[in-house]
Image: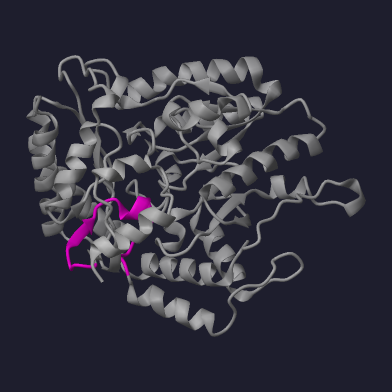
């Protein structure tokens, strides 16, 4: 089987996500036959380092033996069972483990299939909580500028990235948008922390003036991943937790992409020293193997739904594969690796290597920013370094980096003008340095007039 054989069949039958399919008239489609560790291999034995963790999901490499063994063992026991009225050991074990490792007070787990589904469930839970508490007027949500929380309609409404949202605006609920604490926009000489505190003033005014109509604030802590990997200081979330408590508003932490070690701690909320009212997890939850998500919430939220059936206070929300046993077994194997292999400590070493490997780009005339939280690093290409004027998006400079990376054994899929590394944690320092060299070459090619 040749690459061209698969590609020809694919383009006749498959509609790919987040893709203008006409691009594939000139942009190569890469069919992957197998994966191992950080490597993806096509049908002609070309290899690519998976620098983006296959859309930020893979933590411990492709075909991880420990996770593979967990899948085999579980499939011989139970592949799936309805979670309404029934239960199984993997979902109980996973729930207990998640409650133990997440911030204090998150004592109940509600399962769904993917990140967007988790956001949808959290939105409904928050609104329904206030309704059950006799406050049906609380039905609005607050998001951050440049935020992204998924593609289903409720999750999409909570986003603020026009590329994904504008087309569907007529279908979406209206939300209240507060300015982002994104440190890229800070004044010269202003620290990340000072800028976050300054930006929080607008959020505080919104909550002070409109808390009677607001269910919850929804945030992606520390990194706005689909928002071009823009980053901010944890103090913003410390202040936000205090304000939500003061004004009686829920805090929903979307840790779907930033959880499980991506920001340098197991969960991003740890760096702000907070516990949200809802924490949404997916992606790394199953280390890139299977779709599974969970909303963790508090006893207070759970208790607001606990009543006789006739009161209609129950949370009647479901997905067919809720709490799938195989997915739960994979998640348990993932947590075992975190527990046994000193992952967070090892990542600190890898993160330092990542920073050192691209430090030279700080002086590049078309690099406007290099930013990092833990195992996520982003390099933003700009038209003018002094003013941070961006290249027009229509020029698609990032595609030039992507094309080059494929010739150099790397999968680097930029977000607009932003080249980023979010690799599996099994990557080596040598492989990181190779990615940095490829990115440097690609940026040089991409920024030439």
Q: Is residue 374 left or right of residue 280?
A: left
* Residue 91 point in image, percent of width and height: 60, 68
Give the colour scheme shown.
Answer: one colour
Residue 20 part of the magenta-drawn span: no
Q: 291 or 256: nearer the eye?
A: 291
* Residue 239 point in image, percent of width and height: 48, 28
Magenta residues, dominant SS class: loop
* Residue 195 point in image, percent of width and height: 35, 21
Query: Which quadrant of the rendered structure holds the N terminus?
Result: bottom left
Residue drawn 55% across and 50% down? Answer: 104
**Which residue sits furthest bottom?**
76
Residue drawn 22% across and 16% down? Answer: 188
Q: Residue 379, can we see it? A: no
Residue drawn 79% across and 29% down? Answer: 135
Residue 61 part of the magenta-drawn span: yes
Residue drawn 45% across and 77% down? Answer: 70
Q: Residue 262, can we see it? A: yes
Q: 219 or 1: nearer the eye?
A: 1
Is 23 rendered above or below residue 115? above
* Residue 343 point in image, percent of width and height: 31, 61
Is 261 rendered above or below residue 75? above
Q: Is residue 341 left or right of residue 397?
A: right
Span highlighted in magenta in the image = 43-62
Q: 127 or 275: nearer the eye?
A: 127
Is 232 rendered above or below residue 356? above
Query: Which quadrant of the rendered structure holds the C terminus?
Result: top left
């Amino acid at each position: 089987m040749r690459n061209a054989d698969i590609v020809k069949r694919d383009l006749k039958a498959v509609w790919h996500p987040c893709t203008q399919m006409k691009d594939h008239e000139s942009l190569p489609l890469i069919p992957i036959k197998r994966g191992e560790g950080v490597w993806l291999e096509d049908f002609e034995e070309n290899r690519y380092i998976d620098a983006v963790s296959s859309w930020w999901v893979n933590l411990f490499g492709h075909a991880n033996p420990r996770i593979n063994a967990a899948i085999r063992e579980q499939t011989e026991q139970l592949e799936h069972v309805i979670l309404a009225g029934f239960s199984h050991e993997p979902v109980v074990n996973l729930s207990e483990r998640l409650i133990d490792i997440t911030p204090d007070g998150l004592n109940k787990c509600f399962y769904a299939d993917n990140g967007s589904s988790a956001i949808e469930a959290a939105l409904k839970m928050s609104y329904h909580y206030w309704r059950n508490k006799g406050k049906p007027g609380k039905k609005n949500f607050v998001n951050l500028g440049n935020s992204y929380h998924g593609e289903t309609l409720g999750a999409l409404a909570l986003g603020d990235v026009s590329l994904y949202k504008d087309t569907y605006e007529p279908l979406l609920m209206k939300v209240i948008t507060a300015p982002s604490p994104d440190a890229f926009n800070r004044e010269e000489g202003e620290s990340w922390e000072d800028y976050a505190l300054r930006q929080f003033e607008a959020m505080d005014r919104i909550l002070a003036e409109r808390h009677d109509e607001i269910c919850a604030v929804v945030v992606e802590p520390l990194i706005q991943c689909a928002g071009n990997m823009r980053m901010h200081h944890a103090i913003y979330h410390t202040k936000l937790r205090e304000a939500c408590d003061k004004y009686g508003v829920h805090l929903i932490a979307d840790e779907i992409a930033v959880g499980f070690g991506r920001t340098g701690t197991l969960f991003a909320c740890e760096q702000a020293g907070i516990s949200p009212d809802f924490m949404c997890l997916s992606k790394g939850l199953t280390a890139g193997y299977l779709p599974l998500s969970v909303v963790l919430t508090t006893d207070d939220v759970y208790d607001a739904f606990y009543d006789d059936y006739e009161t209609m206070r129950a949370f009647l929300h479901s997905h067919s594969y809720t709490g799938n046993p195989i997915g739960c077994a994979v998640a348990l194997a993932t947590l075992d690796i975190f527990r046994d292999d000193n992952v967070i400590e090892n990542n600190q070493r890898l993160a330092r290597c990542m920073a050192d490997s691209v430090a030279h780009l700080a002086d590049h005339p078309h690099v406007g920013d290099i930013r990092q939280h833990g195992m996520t690093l982003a390099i933003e290409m700009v038209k003018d370094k002094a003013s941070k004027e961006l290249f027009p998006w229509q020029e698609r400079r990032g595609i030039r980096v992507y094309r080059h990376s494929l010739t150099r054994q790397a999968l680097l899929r930029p977000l607009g003008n932003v080249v980023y590394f979010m690799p599996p944690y099994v990557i080596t320092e040598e492989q990181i340095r190779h990615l940095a060299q490829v990115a440097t070459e690609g940026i040089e090619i991409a920024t030439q007039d």
